[in-house]
Image (cartoon, rainbow, N blue to C red):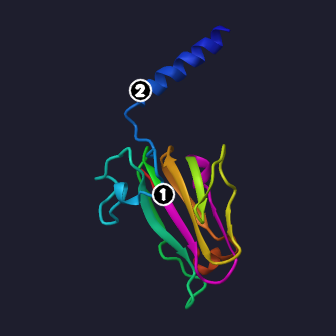
Amino acid sequence: MRKFRAVAFAALVGMALTQDQAWAQDGNDDDAAAGAASTEASPQAEKTTRASKDVPELILGSKQDQFTASQKDFELIAGQGYRWKITAAGGLEYKFHTDLFRNVWNNQIVINDLEVHMNGAPAWLEFDADGTIQVQFTTVRPGIYTWSVPDLADKGMKGTITIK
């Protein structure tokens, strides 16, 4: 029982020390204007805020090139809430995989204004048709994470997500 109390006390102290950490915004998740991130500013210059920020949309494929990605590398800051739209636009079936999902606090996944709330990370996102999935999360653990469409990674459909 003493060990339990010591662990509980340590957890309580840890929570108290992180009170000034940013959390994802409460309220309407569609209010993107409140925390839109500028893609020109470096993550080192940015501060965490209570409002979720938008990650630049990742578009997988296009009508002209099914194996292109709109952006390969992303930089985020630890302790910040984010909204990330991932869109399939190339007409292929894309299986989006990233180790990022296991290293953030996942808030929800939104598909056509339908919300999926989880108590754990998704293994991958699969696009059987063109469309958009929005993932909302708060970064927790700094590091460099990878994303890819595993069957098409050798064609350039891969990149990194750096949390500083």
The amino acid type of the residue labelled 2 equals: Leu
Which residue lies at the image location 42% right of the left edge and 60% below the top edge? 54
Residue linked to disc 2 = 17
* Secondary-structure class at tag 1: strand
Foreground mark, 2 or 1, reads 1
Quarter assignment of residue 119:
top right
Where in the figure is residue 142, as x and y percent of width and height?
47, 47
Q: Residue at horizontal 41%, vertical 57%?
A: 31
Reply above or below: 120 against 149: above
Q: Which residues are magenta?
A: 83-104
Q: Position of residue 128 (x, y in %)?
A: 71, 74
Residue at position x 61%, y 83% in the image: 90
Numbered label tally: 2
Q: Please state the horizontal and vertical placement of residue 23, each as a whole percent of the image.
A: 44, 42
Residue at the extreme top of the image, as rendered: 2
Camera-side residue: 2 or 117? Answer: 117
17 shown above or below 68: above
Residue 40 position by quadrant: bottom left
* Magenta-drawn stretch contains 86: yes
Vertical relation: 35 (above or below) 68: above
- The crowding category of the residue bearing disc 2, from other C-alpha atoms within 10 Å (few below 14, some 14 to 19, many at least 20), is few
Mark earlier in primary sequence (2, 1):
2
Q: Quadrant of the N terminus?
A: top right
Disc 2 and disc 1 in contact, CB within 8 angstroms: no
Q: Which element is circle 2 on?
A: helix
Give the residue at mark 1: 83
The structure residue drawn at horizontal position 29% and vertical position 61%, both measured from the top left corner, is: 41
The Cα atoms of the two marked residues, 2 and 1, are separated by 26 Å
Q: Amino acid at mark 1?
A: Arg
Question: Residue 113 or 56: which is nearer the viewer?
Answer: 113
Q: Taking the image as drawn, is residue 159 in sight?
A: no
Per the image, is 44 magenta?
Answer: no
